[in-house]
Image (tube, rainbow, N blue to C red):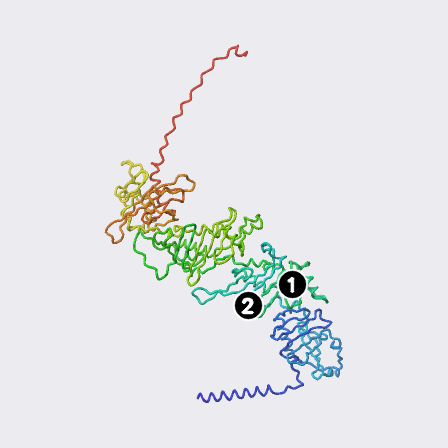
Amino acid sequence: MRFRITILLVLANIVVFGFLWQNLNTPRDPAVPGPLFGADIRRIVVGGRGVAQPYTVEADRLGNWRLTAPYEWEADPAAIELLRNELRYFNMDGSFTLAEAKANGSPISFYGLDAPEVTVSVTTAGAPAPTVIHFGRESGEKIYLLAPAADGNPDNARVIPAPRRLRDILVTNPDKTLRSRSVFTIESFEVRNITVHVSADTASDIPPESGADNSVQFRIRRAERPLPESADIEHIWRFETPFTANANKNQLQGALARLVKLPLIKFIPAPKGERREFFSRHGLETPSLVLAIEAGNNTQVLRVGKRDPNPEGTPAYFARLERNNAVFTVAESAVKEWREARNFREEEFLHFFPAALTEIGIYEGGRKLVLHRRDESAKTETPANANAPDEDASASPATRNAIGLSAAEIGEWSILALPGTDVKVPLTADPAAMRSLVETLRYIRAQTDFSGTGATPDRRRLYSAFVTDTPSVNELRNWGFEKPARRVELYFKNAPRRALLIAAPVAADTPPHAKLEDAPSVYSIRRNLPDAISASPAKYRNRLVARLPAQNITALRITNLKTNTVVLDLPTSAKNKTPDAPAPTAAPTTAAPTTAAPTTAAPTTPSPLTPLTPLLAGLPPSAQNDIRALVECLGELRAAAFDDAPFSADFKYKHAGFQEPFPWLYRLDITLRPAGAANDETVALYFSKRLDGITQIAGAPAQDCVFKITQPLIDALFPLTFEKERALEIPPIAPPPPIPAPTEPPKSPPATPADAKK
């Protein structure tokens, strides 16, 4: 069955191909008119006294169409395709010869073909000569054409009634419909190199160097950079001259997209005569700006000359393409950003991939700090020790990923205890502090300091974002790079080490400067950036000091170290039912009934602190709430910030605005019984007085640290310490002495006549 079907299909194919072969090879009847033009049209010339602006368009060997008259320019592919389609599919249906027209009594003048106003010459590939047609008069929606005879006999020339739209399409203004609207024909994604030459008299954005010519040439190259631990690559742009640096990718690609779509405003007619004089008059012999874009073997060069004295609306410049004599104008705004090509320079000069970062070394004066990224395989389970700090559980992935780098890029870090550092034992680094450090280094950028606008030109560059790319040895020494204020060494996985040098300000009014150890360029940075990079381990230490779970707490005691008195003693105070403030006691005869007791305010629901309920039984509701707030803060004791000093019982804190330092005022003793333990253990914490609304200092002997406590802990301690002792610290004010009763003044004796005379 299958064999029969196959045989039938083969026979059917033979029949179809035979039919096609017979029809394709049958000679066309000469009496039947066919297409007037061939399919492969290569050149079109439109002229005549009825054409306001004659033009010529032709295709090169690659099939790209160009206007060659009245000027040389790239043609609009869509407009050319419309022209070609109208000519390729135009046939001579309804045509007749001149001999037939004369036989019918219609001379050639009847069709307006004795003196045609429009002549169109069409050249097709392989044709010995172009085909020339003439347009005559219109008749309604038709127009008469005269096409030459194939045998050259004038009587055999054919008159063709054609649609009038054919004339409307061919007779057009090439400046409005046929030319390409853009100056360049290269697409932005094709560009691999950009060269910008700015002449000396227009390079005002270039700071003058001693004895140097201000003319400059920028060469920007598109490069590829492999991504770490990935087969992908990243496309970047780099300056190769006059300095070596990355370009701002987004900014440059946006400018390049605008450049390749650069529209011209108008063409400038070239008079007959010397072209060199014409170019010189428009500033194109010695252009002020030369822009060259390269895409493979295709390079296009734009030369920009003088400003147009009579612009059509927007300010414009004269311009022309190299190897093209057409002069035109372009908008000033379109080329202005390329006159200042150095502004495309990337301000972020320390580019690296945070995920590849393995170690950071910070050197500040004589101090040294080494931060090491922990390997995934080296992670171990945290011991079940109530006093040992753990990972920063509060920094959830949602919080850490909200802004900036991802949590995977930041990683987990440790502070190493190495010789020459201030670290005695290895510490876990705080995720938030490490995020701040890594992002500060990753996004460090050159920044202009506008406070130096009135400085001398030589000193003014100390305030510019890019100070210099060719510093001398003396300049580096004078600017403090021989002994920098900060030195940051970055180590990477499968990549060489990089070092950042930060110098202190040269003077009080200048910004700090930075440079890379392996590059000469010097940059200005923001004034407070050095403060964000410190060799102090306290800045990066994990803010979690200790975990003191509420279910393990068996006793609390707060002692005033100044008076050596106990401020809070739990559970003793609970057993004695000591209220936190005296209150008057009502007489038995007027005591409220027991049913009124529920009107007393109930304590806050202690759902997470339920194990404390037996200890707090009998205390007033306010005291219960205060103790619960304290215990909740102790569950995860966190530091707002660490101090560089280790713990000492004699420590005194120097607070801003006070001359005398503050010693420890309170000691909090926390008795714990860890789960499964037979004996209690006591943890001591020391506190200063509350220094202001948001500052109070604490010390942890077990962790050997001094730190500022968080606001919730400040607020929890306040009612249990200061408010309990304010009656002792604030002496009672004695009442003022009584005011004596007023006395009547003595009465004067009556006046005598002698007094009256006086």
Q: Residues within 10 Å of mark 2 (few under 14, many from 20)?
A: few
- The answer to whether residue 195 shows anywhere in this view is yes
Residue at the extreme top of the image, as rendered = 754
- The answer to whether residue 392 shows anywhere in this view is no
Q: Nearer the viewer, residue 592 or 218?
A: 218
Image quadrant for the N terminus? bottom left
The residue under label 2 is 190
Q: Nearer the viewer, residue 113 or 536?
A: 536
Residue at the extreme front of the image, as rendered = 474
Q: Nearer the viewer, residue 740 or 353?
A: 353
Judge whether 691 appears above or below 734 on screen: below
Rendering quarter of residue 410 = bottom left
Give the left or right position of residue 44, taking residue 437 as reference: right
Q: Residues within 10 Å of mark 1 (few under 14, many from 20)?
A: many
> Nearer the N terminus, badge 1 or badge 2?
2
The amino acid type, in three-letter code, at marker 2 is Glu
Total tally of numbered discs in the picture: 2
| Dot label at residue 200 | none
Residue at the extreme left of the image, as rendered = 678
Where in the figure is residue 153, as x and y percent of width and height? 73, 83
The amino acid type, in three-letter code, at marker 1 is Ala
Give the left or right position of residue 472, taking residue 61 as reference: left
Indicate the secondary structure of the residue bearing disc 2: helix
Where in the figure is residue 131, as x and y percent of width and height? 68, 79
Image quadrant for the C terminus? top right
The residue under label 1 is 319
